[in-house]
Image: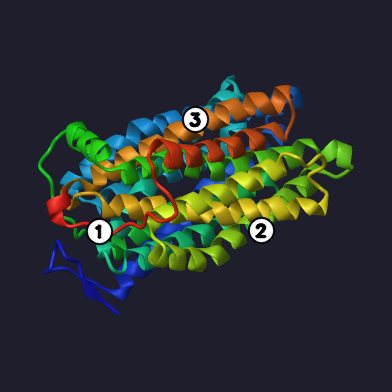
Amino acid sequence: MAFLQNDAPTKIIGAHNWNALYLSSALCLMLMTLAAGTQPLYLREVLNIPPDIAGTINANIMVLAETLELLVVGWVGVLSDRFGRVRILYLGFTLAGVGALLAPFSAAVAAAFGGGGLVLYYLSRLIMAAGIGAVWPQLATLAGDFTTEDNRARLMSNNAFMMAFGKSLVYLILMRIPLHAGVIVTMLLVAVAAFGGALVARGGLTDVAPRSHHSSIPWRRIGDLLRANPKLRLSFAAAFLARSDMVITAIFLMLWYVYFSDLADVTDEQAAARGGLMIGLAGITVMLSIPFWKVIIHSLGRVPAIIIGLALSGLGFVLMGLIVNPFDWYILAPVVLTAAGQAGCFVAPQVLTVDLSPPDILGSVMGAFNVIGGIGIIFFVQVGGVLFDVIGPSAPFIFVGLANFLVIAYAVLGLGLSLKDGAAPVGEDQW
């Protein structure tokens, strides 16, 4: 089935274009998630990072990577408005693949040249971050380009479903590979996903958005949009939490399992497999809940979906923070609850942001939206790493859970929004 994109009526978006976008989204989340999921295991087993500084080291790597992504995300949004999304997607996937090839051999290469393996691993993760920063924002923006007001919630939810599928595949299947083939082989699959994404982007995607002629980020127009619309401000506030929620789950839950392995009397690989199973369960929950969020977004509106998602995610994180032993099976309940909320927090703000953005600067607005998300990751991961080491493994989850409830309070008390505030279609006169 195909349909005409409103702003480029001469371009037809066919099923092959959507399939390429869906596959690119799955591959992007595979490489992002697998890179993060194998990190604690590689640092412990290959680089011999001791447990007492593991939380801080893991957090520092993520924070440096996200800081670099911030520098990339905003500008690639502007560049995509000028030169198109597909070219940036191809180059980003390729660069991420180069970093992914270096990462598993960082210790061996450093030893051969007399350097530090940890420093080279930092460098490889920064190269991956630069590539990833050019990729994932363009996927959501391209999905927005392909859609109209009527089908946006449905089709962007489908794209989010494929992202959740890629993440789930990593933790349900690929994170079990270290048990049989080791962490190095598993890390090489990150490069496979990255170069595969580059081929898919080049061969199956097309640009349909109108080209812009601005050469810098249109901060004034973005600022005017935010000042004029409290719903867009809520969307940006939710973005501050949405990506960090997912990263907190992936990094600190896996870290908790790996560094709890001695107390649980299991091997590091067994602990990583168990952590992967739990995070994979979260991914499946996201996948299964997206069709429900699609209905909620379409029937109740974007704003109610964001508020409900924040409430579910916040409650799940607080409950997860009450767990003492991650190997106890009753951790399933907060993991599922958190993941269900994360799905709504991820999809609804993106849909709302596309609704409220002028087509000629959609890439720039989405770039700013994603920069806010990156700042959120830096803040919550850095603070969470310190809390993990100083207070305990449950502390980062409680901290993020409370932050979710603070954003709900901001929406209701600060912006005057409620569950009755749906998102009406936006006409050009409102831009």
Q: Is residue 112 visible?
A: no
Question: Horizontally, is 423 left or right of 159 in the view?
Answer: left
**Against 358, is 26 above or below?**
below
- Badge 2: how crowded within 10 Å, few (<14), some, or many (20+)? some
Residue occupied by mark 1? 145
Q: Position of residue 302 (x, y in %)?
A: 39, 56
User: Who is closer to the viewer here, 21 or 354?
Assistant: 354
Mark 3 residue element? helix
Picture residue at 69% right of the left edge, 38% below the top: 255
Q: Position of residue 114 (x, y in %)?
A: 59, 19
Number of the label disc, if any, that sits on residue 378: 3
CA separation in Å, label 1 and label 2? 31 Å
Picture residue at 32% right of the left edge, 42% below the top: 230
- Where is residue 3, by image quadrant? bottom left
Q: Earlier in the sequence, mark 1 or mark 2?
A: 1
Q: Position of residue 81 (x, y in %)?
A: 19, 46
- Badge 1: how crowded within 10 Å, few (<14), some, or many (20+)? many
- Badge 3: how crowded within 10 Å, few (<14), some, or many (20+)? many
Question: Horizontally, is 8 left or right of 374 in the view?
Answer: left
Picture residue at 57% right of the left edge, 20% below the top: 115
Picture residue at 12% right of the left edge, 68% below the top: 9
Residue occupied by mark 2? 281
**Against 107, is 156 above or below?**
below
| Tag 2: amino acid | Leu
- Where is residue 215, by image quadrant? top left
